[in-house]
Amino acid sequence: MHELPFVESILKITLEHAEKAGAQRVVALNLVIGQMSSIVDDSVQFYWDLLSQGTIAEGARLNFHRVPAVYRCWDCGHTYTLDGEHLACPQCGSVRVQLVQGDEFRLESIDIE
Amino acid sequence: MPRKVPVVENIFKANDQLAQANRSLLDANRTFAINFMASPGAGKTTTIVRTIHALKDRYRLAGIDGDIATTLDADRIAATGIPAVQINTGGTCHLDAVMVHNALPQIDLPQTDVLIIENVGNLICPANFPLGVHLNVLIASVPEGDDKPYKYPTMYRGVQALLLNKMDLLPYFDFDVDYFRRGVEALNPGLAFFPISAKTGEGFEAWIAWLVARIEAYLQPASE
């Protein structure tokens, strides 16, 4: 929901790394976003289009790599991806489960020229 | 031909780093910090005021209150006799670690055992912005309905204690406490659960006893 300040962060990180790498242009960003992270791709795109104007990252393509939520069951150790909204362990039915992947939001890499 | 530059930076990092800094500052001063969250109107401030009255003869307390407008809540907390600081977020729908970081210098931390932070009334956004506290508490209330754990999983997963307030209104609402508790158990097994009424005081003994045990464990840890 707070994609605006997050995109400000993404732009700042992008320009820092691009400058360090001697880039003239940033062509693409590779974002890794977990299923449970509450980040909406369209909002990220919207704010990116606005904020990147006038920078060397203007027009860079955003590649969204969505990562599924993975849970581990405390009771039987089974790990599984979320099926719909049913949180319970598909192996033993326990609801004592832990999210081990799926709430990340990171800039994995940028493609520069 | 474009070349790939690895970055691998966590976008949530800015807030998380400040939350760590807040936590370090609190620990350096041995101040136990609590973040109270809830929907608007759940009874956060009333619950906090009653909690303060139960604690203030035993501990040195201070409060930080977050709202988008007015000092109404900070004033109510200050009326209990403890120092209170109001953060007006300027429209932002939650407190974040930066705001708390900027407010902490206004609190006399070396003279404070327990810092109570009242978040902005909001069941969604505060859950995504850790503040660096020792205890996150959610105050739900009977009039809000018993399906909220199912609808707001991030919030219900992110707290260590859950107070169900306005139990005095249970006869007037179709609120199935078992259904509610099942939803909570599914998201957060073993979460400490306290049905209360901040208005009548019902259930407060258990809540305060649990809280005092947590505070004591922090302030006076068992020696190695």
Image: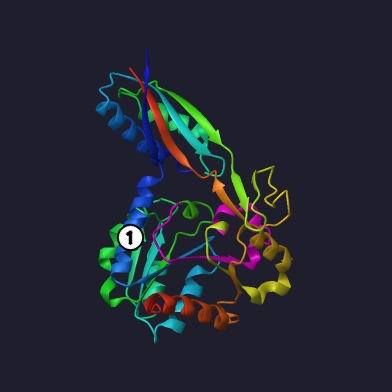
How far across and how far down the image is residue B192, in percent?
A: 58, 70
Q: Total number of numbered labels?
A: 1
Locate residue B85: give its quadrant: bottom left
Magenta stretch contains residue B149: yes
Q: Is residue B215 left or right of residue B104?
A: right
Locate residue A12: give its quadrant: top left
Point 40% across, 58% down: residue: B131
Circle 1: is it few (<14), some (14-19), or many (20+) Cα within 10 Å? many
How far across and how far down the image is residue B210, in percent?
A: 52, 78
Amino acid type for the residue under numbered disc 1: Asn
Chain letter behind tag 1 = B
Q: Is residue B39 left or right of residue B144?
A: left
Point 70% across, 68% down: residue: B177
B41 versus B13 height, above or below: below
Mark 1: which secondary structure?
A: helix
Work out whether residue A79 can be spotted.
yes
Please state which of residues B42 and B30 is positioned toward the viewer in this rendering. B30
How far across and how far down the image is residue B15, in percent?
A: 37, 50
Residue farthest to the front, as pictured: B224
Magenta span covers which residues?
B129-156
Locate residue A7: give its quadrant: top left
Work out whether residue B108 can be spotted.
no
Residue farthest to the bottom, as pictured: B57
How far across and how far down the image is residue A35, in percent?
A: 57, 40
**Residue denoted by label 1:** B22
A12 versus B75 height, above or below: above
Q: Is residue B99 left or right of residue A89?
A: left
Magenta stretch contains residue A84: no
